[in-house]
């Protein structure tokens, strides 16, 4: 109806025909030199096993003139200026295509917070995270193009572990600056775990695939 918001069709189920369309576009992109053989192989498997329009769209997001028809008219989500996550004996997780804000305030009391940036929607160059961790934990899962700095976090009684040091030549898509305090808790910054072996890797006895490319 006129005046209604355009529905987000990314969560709709994909058809065999739509999967075949994405496979064709990926094959053309590889022929143009835009994808390596390994990238093509990885994306073809993901396309053939994709369940939703959003999963298919992610495989074409970095290819020119390859925007899927079902994504047309869907407005990009605007990042918030400030978001808050407060847990007290509970857990919270941000993963998938969540929108990264400009500033994030986290308070963890005997709880856990996980931020997975692997497929996050990143529309800002920097993210400020202020933490107050007391007998809880905060974990950041960062792909190679996301750089996190936790040197300004004061540790009273706990730990800050950084296991995701980027390579100098890697282009940076997002810089994360962490401040705040850890008192009886922990902060961990590490790469995401590799995805589980898919059916075709199992069938062909192929090695476990590398982590998926961020959107």
Image (cartoon, rainbow, N blue to C red):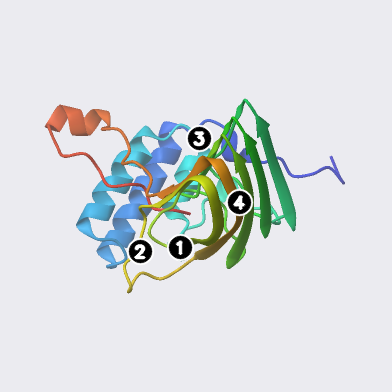
On screen, 186 above or below 33? Answer: above
Give the class, few, some or many, for how many residues have Cα within 10 Å of label 2's Cα (few <14, many ≥20). Answer: some
Asked whether residue 76 is in view, the answer is: no
Pointer 1 residue: 147
Q: Are marks 1 and 2 in contact (CB under 8 Å)?
A: yes
Tell me which label, 1 or 2, sits earlier in the chain. 1
Residue 144 or 90: which is nearer the viewer? 90
Which residue occupies 37% across, 54% down? Answer: 25
The mark closer to the camera, 2 or 4, is 4
**Few, some or many C-alpha atoms within 10 Å of disc 3 (few <14, some 14-19, many ≥20)?**
some
Q: CA distance from mark 3 to mark 4?
A: 40 Å
| Nearer-the-camera pick, 143 or 49 | 143
- Position in image of residue 168 (x %, y %): 33, 73
Q: Nearer the viewer, mark 1 or mark 3?
A: 1
Find out whether the residues at labels 2 and 3 contact each other: C-beta distance under 8 Å.
Answer: no
Disc 2 designates what residue? Answer: 166
- Which residue is the extreme one toward the front? 156
Q: CA distance from mark 2 to mark 3?
A: 32 Å
Q: Earlier in the sequence, mark 2 or mark 4?
A: 2
Quadrant of residue 143 in the image?
Answer: bottom left
Contact between marks 2 and 4 (CB within 8 A): the answer is no
The mark that comes first in sequence, 2 or 3, is: 3
Q: Seen in the image, is 209 located left or right of residue 152?
A: left
Considering the numbered disc 2 on the image, is that residue within a helix, a strand or a loop? loop
- The label shown at residue 52 is 3
Q: Which residue reaches farthest right?
A: 3
Residue 105 location (% of width, % of height): 68, 50
- What residue is rendered at 66% in x and 33% in y? 87
Distance between the alpha carbons at the discs numbered 1 and 2? 7 Å
Residue 39 visible at all: yes
Q: Nearer the viewer, residue 28 or 10?
A: 10
């Amino acid at each position: 109806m006129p005046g209604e918001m355009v529905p987000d069709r990314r969560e709709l189920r994909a058809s065999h025909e739509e999967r075949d369309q994405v496979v064709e576009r990926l094959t053309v992109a590889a022929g143009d030199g835009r994808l390596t053989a390994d990238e093509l192989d990885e994306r073809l498997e993901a396309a053939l096993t994709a369940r939703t329009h959003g999963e298919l769209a992610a495989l074409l997001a970095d290819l020119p003139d390859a925007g899927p028809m079902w994504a047309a008219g869907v407005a990009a989500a605007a990042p918030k200026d400030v978001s808050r996550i407060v847990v007290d004996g509970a857990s919270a997780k941000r993963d998938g295509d969540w929108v990264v804000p400009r500033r994030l305030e986290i308070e963890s009391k005997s709880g856990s917070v996980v931020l997975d940036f692997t497929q996050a929607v990143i529309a800002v160059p920097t993210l400020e995270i202020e933490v107050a961790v007391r007998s809880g934990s905060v974990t950041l899962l960062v792909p190679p193009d996301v750089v996190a700095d936790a040197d300004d976090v004061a540790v009273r009684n706990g730990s800050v572990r950084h296991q995701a040091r980027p390579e100098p030549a890697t282009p940076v898509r997002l810089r994360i600056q962490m401040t705040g305090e850890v008192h009886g808790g922990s902060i961990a910054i590490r790469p995401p775990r590799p995805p589980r072996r898919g059916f075709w890797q199992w069938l062909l006895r192929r090695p476990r695939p590398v982590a998926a490319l961020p959107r």
